[in-house]
Amino acid sequence: MVSLTGSLFRSRLDKRFDDRTARFHTSVVEDLRIFEDDIDGTEAHDIMLHEQGVIPLEALKLILSALEEIRGEWRRGEVEIGAEFEDIHEYIEARVIKKIGIEAGGMLHTGRSRNDQVMVDVRLRVRDEILEMGERVLDFVEALLEKADRHRETVMILYTHGQHAQIGTFAHYLMAYADALLRDFQRLMDCYGRVNRNPLGSGPVGGTSINIDRGRTTELLGFDGLVENSIDATSGRDWAIETASVSAILMSHLSRVAADLIEWSTAEFGYVEVADEYSSSSSIMPQKKNPSTLELIRGKTGEVYGALMELLTMVKGVPSGYYQDLQGTKPPLWRCLDTVKTCLEVMTGIISTLKVREGRMREAVEGSLAIALDVAEGLVAEKGLPLARRGPREEDAGGGREPPRPQAG
């Protein structure tokens, strides 16, 4: 394992953190997710600095070579980062300096703060996560469409207020959520456009006097444009909150599908049966087959809602500029993204393998009065009868008589 000790950024302080404070202060654990993104952002920044005449070519070659060696160590599982490092940015910089020396390695961070550095890393990671989430949404929609195509003629009761309302088809039901998930996909893509903006070059909060080219790093990293204001770039988190918000709306749709299928898989309904690979059994009741995976999806919706509320609460009282509070926005964001991606993947499998009991659905239709509206509308269309509820009885309405007066006393 490759390990280092000692903090680069605490050199002006006389004392180190004690072990407990170091563990409390470090963000290394949540930063592991952006390890390679940090390397990508650093490489783009230093290539730009060389093109601007800030870093000599030989120094750039050494820096890039060291960064790629560190990437290789990371991929081989050889990196070990302790709590003595405040974050992975510090670790990577220290590792580069150890490999190539302070003269070249010390140029790596020129014209950049950890504040804009972490923002470019997180935006790089979140944009990839959004694209992956979008792919899984489309996979789920495809599963819904395929199942709907096989059940165009599968009649079923449609419900309002939990009561028999009208007669429809299972395909019609499935297409309702295909439409909803396509709106979720559009929301994700709209959100992607606001996430995919480059904060690099904003410095700690007010930019840098180094001759940088923000347009060049935007091009190298594949961003659609700049976060133009340096205060906004380093301290704004609305794009992260929006990501969680879109995720929460998406999960609301998965949760409603789950609620339907859980109810419809009961013995009382018997409309559907969840495949064994997505079910569980009882520890004591041999007759039980539980749609537990759907229950978990419904429950995990609360986790995503909680992540959204956590993010909103975390930023609501933070003044303008960067504060360490904002470091805490990463864990709920990562949890949110992981939960949504997993739930989409699992729900796609559930729908693809779902057994639909067409006979039981038809049986419920045949014993229902849900045809009443169709009959009433037929009478309107064919006989010209008014489709109106019966008015109040004359005696209830008072029949034109004067209402009784209240008695005194």
Image (cartoon, helix red, strand yellow):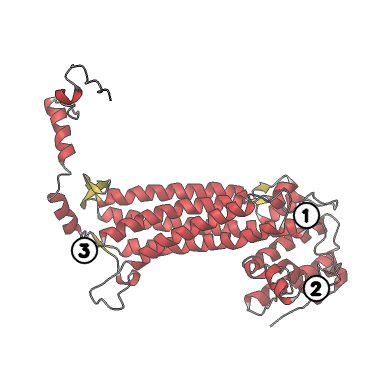
Q: Secondary structure at mark 2?
A: loop
The residue carrying pointer 2 sits among few (fewer than 14), some (14 to 19) or many (20 or more) residues within 10 Å by Cα, namely few
Residue 202 at x, y percent in the picture: 76, 51
Q: Is residue 123 left or right of residue 98?
A: left
Query: Disc 3 to disc 1, how far (Cα)?
Result: 61 Å
Q: Where the N terminus falls, by quadrant?
A: bottom right
In front of the other: label 3 or label 1?
3
Q: Earlier in the sequence, mark 3 or mark 1?
A: 1
> Which amino acid type corresponds to the residue marked 3 in the rendered image?
Ala
Q: Is residue 11 above or below residue 351?
A: below
> Which amino acid type corresponds to the residue marked 1 in the rendered image?
Pro
Q: Earlier in the sequence, mark 2 or mark 3?
A: 2
Q: Where the C terminus falls, by quadrant?
A: top left
- Residue in the image at 45% along x and 53% along y: 250
Q: Which residue is mark 3?
A: 267
In front of the other: label 2 or label 1?
2
Q: Which residue is mark 2?
A: 16
Residue 1 at least partly seen: yes
Q: Which residue is mark 1?
A: 204
Q: Secondary structure at mark 3?
A: loop
Q: Is residue 242 left or right of residue 95?
A: left
Q: Earlier in the sequence, mark 2 or mark 1?
A: 2
